[in-house]
């Protein structure tokens, strides 16, 4: 029998097709056949075992993959359900973070009429500062009407309307003439409608009868808009009507038309832009005061500007708000910018150093790396996410979101108690009490975070709290640092409410003018100054202001109430 060579592709370790030397092969064909059959059966057995093992491994991998897909599918279903539940609740349900009476904005008359007693049909007015001598309060012993209504200011002017008894009825049945023994006084609210009038400026002109000298004329009064026929007081009313009362220029055009004055809305818009340009020095001084303090709040909200170069009319721009200033001089500034990029805060706070409070938006990321700027986190935004996580739970069920809300509520309870304390006392209170609550919340977060899917509402709240943790706890370092960004959100709210009425700005110039006027009006309101009286005073004095001292004297905190009331 010829010599056989080993199969170079055989695997000796497997026992299949092993190398068999020629001297080991039997000479008997039957035995050789039996040996080959045995090797074939061994190969088939091992192949079947390997195939079964591969099959089982493949089935296990398929089951694992199916379980992962099922888990991801359930997580996605839960995410969509939570989003739908939150969307429906925001649209149709009550909001726990808003005032209970907010729904009355849409059915104010019906709701107030049903909830108020009949005795509330009369307003409660304070008595005049001085009463005529001999007056007898007839109703002093009567039962006080139900309801706690804030009385109208005693500063409101009172106009006496005397109702006398006819002379024929002032004779007693015995024939004796009656004498006055007292009077009954009741008060009514009255209003004088807006009066549109024309101011005729008559400038006297004098000349020499002999003609030896050119005539002289009285100087024309200085005006904010010299080339227009709008008085300074009208401009103040125009700004307040749109930016305080939220009345679009188109509707104010109709208001003037009812008085017989036809002023197109385009003209009104030019008046607004021109007045804003004249008020720019006041806004510049306010910005100096803002940047002179080391704590600033920032926030932003969308605004639509129809005519922006290179952008569609439906594009969304941003209105940025900054709030700060030293104690007693709060400043609120608005700034229009087409972008929401990180370059905007860098531009607005260029050269400034201090603590900046903002939400978790990445637009504030670059400013946080600027030398001397420390970014603070907002606990209201962190809490709001846990509020949403609690809303998706079944009615009446408490979950982990409520545990976080309870701990955050403790932080705010401590802040409420320390509100009237000095900065040093507040810092001590935070270190002694708030620090312990923060540590407890951190331990709870480390325990719960790994067990909750990140895509769920609760997972999103936990992830936000974890990412923002260093910024959220930074307020513990000083007693004057804020715990949240509520001041900025409250400052931007009037703009959001007004935006629902006027909807958009036509041009970039109009958007910038709106930002400047909102800055002035909201700063005046923050300083407890009535916007119209202040704007009227500023616009009357603005044309003659020539120095920094003149403009500085017009800032809200530099004016006395008596200066504004003077007509």
Image (tube, rainbow, N blue to C red):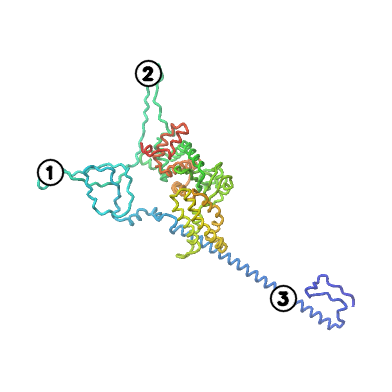
Residue at image x 56%, y 53%?
Answer: 470
Q: Tell me if 267 is positioned left or right of 454 in this view.
A: left
- Residue 346 position by quadrant: top right
Coordinates of residue 31 in the picture (x, y in percent): 83, 83
Judge whether residue 319 can be spotted in this image.
no
Q: Which residue is mark 1?
A: 177
Question: Residue furthest toward the right?
Answer: 2
Marks 1 and 3, Cα distance to the nearest angstrom?
131 Å
Say what secondary structure mark 3 lies in: helix
Q: Nearer the viewer, residue 327 or 99?
A: 327
Viewport quadrant of the C terminus: top left
- Mark 2 or 1: in front is 1
Nearest to the eye among marks 1 and 3: give it.
1
Q: Position of residue 229 (x, y in %)?
A: 41, 34
Q: Position of residue 322 (x, y in %)?
A: 50, 45
Q: In terms of depth relative to the viewer, which is nearer, 391 or 368?
A: 368
Of residue 466 and residue 520, the one placed in the foreground of this image is 466
Residue 131 can be seen in this image: yes
Residue 527: percent from the left, percent from the top? 42, 43
Give the mark nearer the N terminus: 1 vs 3: 3
Badge 2 or badge 1: first in the primary sequence: 1
Mark number displayed over residue 208: 2
Would you call the spot at circle 1 few (<14 residues within 10 Å), some (14-19), or many (20 or more)? few
**Among numbered discs 2 and 3, the one appearing first in the sequence:** 3
The local secondary structure at tag 1 comes to: loop
What number of labels is visible?
3
> From the viewer's perspective, is 352 left or right of 140?
right
Give me the disc on residue 49.
Answer: 3
What kind of element bears circle 2? Answer: loop
Disc 2 to disc 3, C-alpha distance: 130 Å
| Horizontal side, residue 162 vs residue 543: left or right | left
Residue 220, relative to residue 356: is it above or below? above
């Amino acid at each position: 029998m010829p010599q056989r060579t080993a199969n170079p592709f055989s695997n000796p370790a497997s026992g299949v097709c092993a190398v068999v030397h020629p001297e080991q092969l039997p000479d008997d064909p039957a035995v050789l056949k039996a040996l080959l059959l045995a090797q074939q059966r061994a190969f088939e057995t091992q192949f079947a075992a390997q195939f079964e093992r591969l099959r089982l491994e493949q089935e296990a991998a398929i089951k694992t993959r199916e379980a992962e897909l099922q888990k991801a599918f359930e997580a996605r279903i839960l995410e969509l359900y939570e989003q739908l539940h939150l969307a429906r609740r925001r649209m149709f349900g009550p909001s726990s973070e808003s005032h209970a009476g907010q729904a009355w904005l849409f059915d104010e008359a019906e709701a107030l009429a049903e909830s108020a007693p009949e005795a509330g049909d009369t307003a409660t007015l304070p008595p005049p500062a001085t009463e005529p001598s001999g007056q007898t309060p007839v109703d002093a012993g009567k039962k006080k009407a139900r309801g706690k209504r804030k009385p109208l200011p005693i500063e409101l002017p009172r106009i006496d309307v005397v109702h006398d008894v006819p002379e024929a009825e002032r004779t007693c049945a015995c024939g004796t003439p009656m004498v006055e023994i007292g009077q009954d006084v009741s008060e009514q609210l009255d209003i004088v409608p807006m009066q549109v009038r024309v101011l005729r400026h008559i400038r006297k002109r004098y000349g020499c009868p002999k003609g030896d000298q050119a005539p002289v004329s009285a100087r024309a009064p200085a005006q904010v808009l010299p080339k227009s026929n709008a008085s300074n007081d009208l401009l103040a009313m125009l700004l307040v009507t749109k930016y305080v009362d939220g009345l679009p220029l188109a509707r104010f055009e109709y208001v003037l038309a009812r008085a017989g004055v036809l002023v197109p809305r385009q003209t009104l818009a030019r008046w607004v832009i021109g007045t804003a340009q004249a008020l720019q020095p006041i806004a510049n001084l306010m910005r100096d005061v803002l940047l002179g303090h080391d704590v600033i709040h920032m926030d932003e909200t969308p605004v639509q500007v129809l005519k922006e170069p290179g952008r569609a009319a439906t594009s969304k721009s941003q209105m940025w708000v900054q709030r700060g200033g030293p104690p007693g001089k709060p400043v609120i500034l608005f700034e229009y910018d087409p972008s929401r990029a990180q370059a905007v805060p860098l531009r607005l706070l260029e050269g400034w150093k201090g603590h900046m409070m903002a939400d978790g938006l990445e637009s504030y990321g670059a400013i946080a790396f600027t030398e001397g700027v420390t970014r603070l986190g907002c606990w209201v935004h962190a809490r709001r996410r846990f509020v949403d996580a609690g809303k998706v739970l079944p009615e009446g069920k408490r979950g982990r979101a409520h545990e976080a809300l309870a701990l955050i509520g403790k932080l705010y309870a401590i802040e409420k108690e320390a509100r009237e304390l000095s900065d040093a006392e507040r810092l001590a209170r935070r270190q002694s009490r708030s620090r312990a609550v923060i540590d407890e919340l951190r331990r709870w977060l480390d325990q719960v975070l790994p067990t909750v899917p990140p895509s769920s509402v609760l997972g999103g709240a936990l992830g936000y709290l974890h990412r923002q943790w260093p910024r959220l706890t930074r307020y513990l370092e000083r007693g004057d640092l804020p715990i949240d960004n509520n001041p900025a959100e409250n400052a931007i709210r009037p703009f959001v409410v007004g935006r629902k009425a006027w909807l958009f700005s036509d041009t970039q110039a109009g958007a910038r003018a709106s930002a400047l006027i909102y800055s002035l009006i909201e700063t005046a309101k923050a300083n407890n100054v009535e916007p119209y009286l202040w704007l009227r005073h500023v616009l009357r004095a603005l044309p003659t202001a020539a120095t920094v001292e003149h403009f500085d004297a017009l800032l809200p905190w530099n004016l006395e109430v008596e200066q504004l009331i003077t007509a």
